Amino acid sequence: MTSIQGFRSFLATLVLLLAGGVAEAAPEGGFYISVEGASAGAQQAGAVLVIRTIGCHEPSKANVRVYAEGIVGDKRMSLLLRPRQTSKGVFVVERTWPDEGVWVLAVSANYRGHESAVLVPLEGEGSPGETFATRGEARTIGKGEVEAALQTLVAGHPRSIRTASGS
């Protein structure tokens, strides 16, 4: 075997090994969510957030969960929200949590054993804003991560944890 043939054989083996590693790292082609602030038109209809499930096979069959996690006054709150499916694989989240306090939305989806999640901090009017957009990572959201995000919001907006009555 010449040195060129040996090198080609090495490259072919390397390509096969790398291809096998990629297939193991992303079984079934992968799965993730895309999370965006609602457009002005969707906001007029009450939507705050748009979630899209993306991946191979039928990601529209993913189980999407959203929790509003917040602090109002000195009370810690956790509310299960009901995302509404507007089309295949597209969900909207409408605001159903109190206007007072500081809030984050814990958005997660599971499809065929693959988890994708995003933690969305809410600003001023309780919205991530139209320009917010991110792709969910292959992970879950831990309780400590939610608490740290809330404490960061409290530190940046100390008055926002007061209730509407000013207490």
Image (cartoon, rainbow, N blue to C red):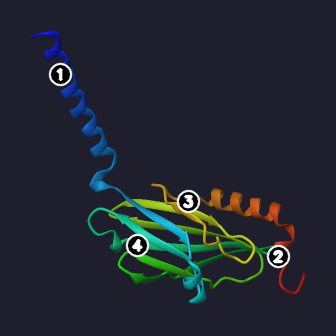
Q: Which residue is mark 1?
A: 8
Amino acid type of the residue that numbered disc 4 sits on in the rendered structure: Asn
Q: Residues within 10 Å of mark 2 (few under 14, many from 20)?
A: some
- Is label 2 in a helix, a strand or a loop? loop
Q: Residue at x 9, y 11 (%)?
A: 1
Task: State whether residue 5 is above or below residue 156.
Answer: above
Per the model, the C-alpha gap separating discs 1 and 3 is 45 Å
Residue type beneath disc 1: Arg
Between the C-alphas of marks 3 and 4, the distance is: 15 Å
Upstream in sequence: badge 2 or badge 3 = 2
Of the numbered discs in the image, which one, if any, rests on residue 73? 2
Image position, residue 112 (x, y; %): 32, 63
Query: Relative to residue 73, is residue 4 drawn left or right?
Result: left
Crowdedness near tag 4: few (<14), some (14–19) or many (≥20) residues, C-alpha within 10 Å: few
Where is residue 18 drawn, in percent x and y?
28, 35
Q: Which mark is residue 141?
A: 3
Mark nearest the camera among 1 and 3 is 1
Q: Earlier in the sequence, mark 3 or mark 4?
A: 4
The Cα–Cα distance between marks 2 and 3, rounded to whole angstroms, is: 24 Å
Secondary structure category for the residue under label 1: helix
Residue linked to disc 4: 63
Q: Secondary structure at mark 4?
A: strand
* Among the two numbered marks 4 and 2 on one chain, the one whose residue lies closer to the N terminus: 4
* Residue occupying the far top of the picture: 2
At x 58% / y 58%, what residue is drawn? Answer: 142
Cα gap from disc 2 to disc 1, whole angstroms = 68 Å
Give the percent coordinates (x, y) of residue 102: 74, 72
